[in-house]
Structures are given as C-alpha cells and as structure tokens.
Amino acid sequence: MTTFIYRAEVRWTRGADEFLHQRYSRGHSWHFDEGLTVPASASPHAVRAPYAIAAAVDPEEALVAAVSSCHMLFFLSLASKAGVVVERYDDVAEGVMAKNELGRVAVTQVTLRPVVAIRAPVPTADQFAALHHAAHEECFIANSVRCEIICEPRMVGVS
C-alpha cells in the first residue's frame, strides 16, 4: 500500500489577551488544501465564554464529523458497486465525552444515525445493514480511533 501524508495547518495568535491567567481566546483557524480556512476553537463545554467561540468548530465536533463523513463515503462507494442508487444521505452523528478505561477524559463513543434515501429497487434490510457494516470495517477514521462507534442506519425509499 502507498503511504499518504495528510496535512493541516493550525494557527493561533495571542493578541492582547492576558495569557498567564488563562484569559486568552481559544479561537484559532485550520487551513487545508487549496486555501480552505475553517474557524476553530476549544469546545464551549470545556472552556467558558468568552474564551471559547461557540460558532467555531471544536476538535471534538471535528472528530465526530470525520467519523460520520468517512463512514458515509465508504457506504456510498459500496452501495454504488452493489448497484444500489443512493439519492440522499443525512446523518446527525453524536459523540460522547466521558472518562475512558484509563480514567482519562476522551470521546468514548460516536453514534451515527444515517437516514439513507434509496431509489428502487431497494435492498433488503439485511443487505442494507451489510453495506453499513462493510463501510464501518473499511472506514479509515473508524480504524484509527479507540472509541466505540455505533451505527443506527435507517433506509427510506424514494419514488
């Protein structure tokens, strides 16, 4: 297998904030390929306002989104290969932050709840579940994290 390198630049500057008393903004930016910049911050669950920016993406949300996105991309690929036409895929994924088996705070569980609209002929429930299981097994991000990942997919037909 070929080895790939993925790169993201993370940038933060203090400005005039009082750094030594924890009174500084956790707001920063993520810079990706082709110039995309995403505003980021510590989670407002971890750092109180005004030091966390609720409207920015926090690392925990990004992890949950990465798990969901990776699963979806593998599911779409596998469905396409199986002749299943997917019209829409919507997921409201959730991550749980709790103490792990070592007593450290971590994302301990991610639950995916994809609702997948499929054009006829619709696969059986077992075939649909098998596609999701295979997507989970192949997902690069799921294979990279230690937390439990639960997938609760729903299939809806499209006329």
Image (cartoon, rainbow, N blue to C red):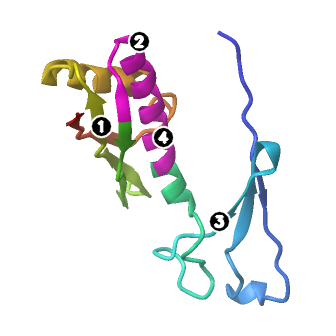
| Secondary structure under the numbered disc 3 in the rendered image | strand
Which residue does the numbered mark 1 point to in the structure image?
116
Which residue does the numbered mark 4 point to in the structure image?
69
Number of the label disc, if any, that sits on residue 156: none
Question: Which of the two residues, 137 or 148, is positioned nearer the viewer here?
Answer: 137
Name the quarter where the C terminus is drawn.
Answer: top left
Q: Tell me residue 118's x, y (percent).
A: 28, 30
Residue 85 painted magenta: yes
Could you tell me which residue is drawn at 37 percent across and 34 percent down? Answer: 87
Which residue does the numbered mark 3 point to in the structure image?
40
| Secondary structure under the numbered disc 4 in the rendered image | helix
Horizontal side of residue 97 vs 6, given as left or right: left
The answer to whether marks 2 and 1 mark residues whose Cβ atoms lie closer than 8 Å is no
**Neighbours of disc 4 within 10 Å: few (<14), some (14-19), many (20+):** some
Kindly report which numbered mark, 2 or 3, lies closer to the viewer in this rendering. Answer: 2
Residue lying farthest left?
A: 125
Number of the label disc, if any, that sits on residue 81: 2
